[in-house]
Image (spheres, rainbow, N blue to C red):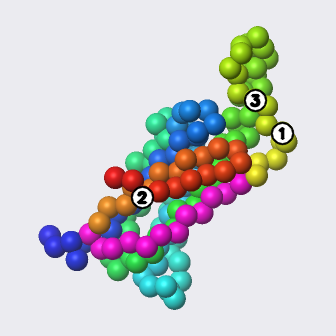
């Protein structure tokens, strides 16, 4: 099949750089549009697995030129913060325990990444995440 007639495809994963491990259980929504002026079409979503990967994102429709990934990270950080507090109580003397966050609020409750795609190409878009920042890139 020619790459010009095959839709682009998308995959993603999330690494929590503050913990040095994959971010499990983050809801990810996928949307696409065919052209800059077109309306976004919600395609569905998934959640990251134990490896921080979304293995079952919906397929992109033919003609897709732009893709949007919405990562709902607030619930993940709230859960992580509760787990860290419990672990800290259990191992208070541990020298390299994660530092307490300076507030209970999540700075980035959502991360939205929008990017252009070319038919027939695969786009792996990793999200490197921490409580006060994030980075994204086109992976392989």
Identify the residue under disc 3: 99
Residue drawn at the location 40% of the way across and 78% of the way down: 65
Note whether 106 is above or below 1 in the view shown. Answer: above
* Quarter location, residue 103: top right
Residue drawn at the location 30% of the way across and 73% of the way down: 119
Whether the residues at callouts 2 and 3 have beta carbons within 8 Å, the answer is no
User: x%, y% of residue 86?
Assistant: 76, 22
Residue drawn at the location 75% of the way across and 29% of the way down: 99
Identify the residue under disc 1: 102
* N-terminal label among 2 and 3: 3
| Residue 114 highlighted magenta (yes or no) | yes
* N-terminal label among 1 and 2: 1
Note whether 21 is above or below 26 in the view shown. Answer: above
Badge 1 crowding class, 10 Å Cα cut-off, few under 14, some 14 to 19, many 20 or more, is few
C-alpha gap between disc 1 and disc 2: 31 Å
C-alpha gap between disc 3 and disc 1: 9 Å
Q: Which of 95 and 76 is in front in this view?
A: 95
Badge 3 crowding class, 10 Å Cα cut-off, few under 14, some 14 to 19, many 20 or more, is few
User: x%, y% of residue 31?
Assistant: 50, 69
Note whether 139 is above or below 39 in the view shown. Answer: above
Span highlighted in magenta in the image: 108-120
User: x%, y% of residue 67?
Assistant: 47, 70
Identify the residue under disc 2: 138
Q: Residue furthest front?
A: 95
Badge 2 crowding class, 10 Å Cα cut-off, few under 14, some 14 to 19, many 20 or more, is few
| Residue 46 highlighted magenta (yes or no) | no
Residue drawn at the location 45% of the way across and 44% of the way down: 53
Left or right of 92 on screen, residue 71: left
Element assignment for label 2: loop
C-alpha gap between disc 2 and disc 3: 30 Å
**What label sits on residue 32 in the rendered view?**
none
């Amino acid at each position: 099949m020619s790459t010009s007639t095959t839709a682009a495809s998308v995959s993603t994963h999330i690494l929590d750089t503050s913990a040095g491990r994959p971010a499990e259980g983050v809801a990810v929504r996928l949307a696409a549009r065919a052209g800059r002026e077109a309306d976004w079409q919600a395609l569905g979503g998934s959640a990251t697995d134990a490896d921080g990967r979304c293995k079952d994102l919906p397929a992109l429709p033919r003609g897709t030129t732009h893709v949007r990934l919405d990562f709902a990270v607030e619930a993940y950080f709230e859960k992580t913060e509760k787990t860290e507090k419990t672990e800290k109580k259990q191992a208070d003397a541990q020298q390299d325990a994660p530092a307490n966050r300076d507030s209970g609020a999540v700075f980035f409750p959502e991360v939205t990444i929008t990017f252009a795609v070319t038919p027939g190409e695969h786009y792996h878009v990793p999200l490197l995440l921490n409580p006060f920042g994030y980075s994204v890139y086109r992976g392989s």
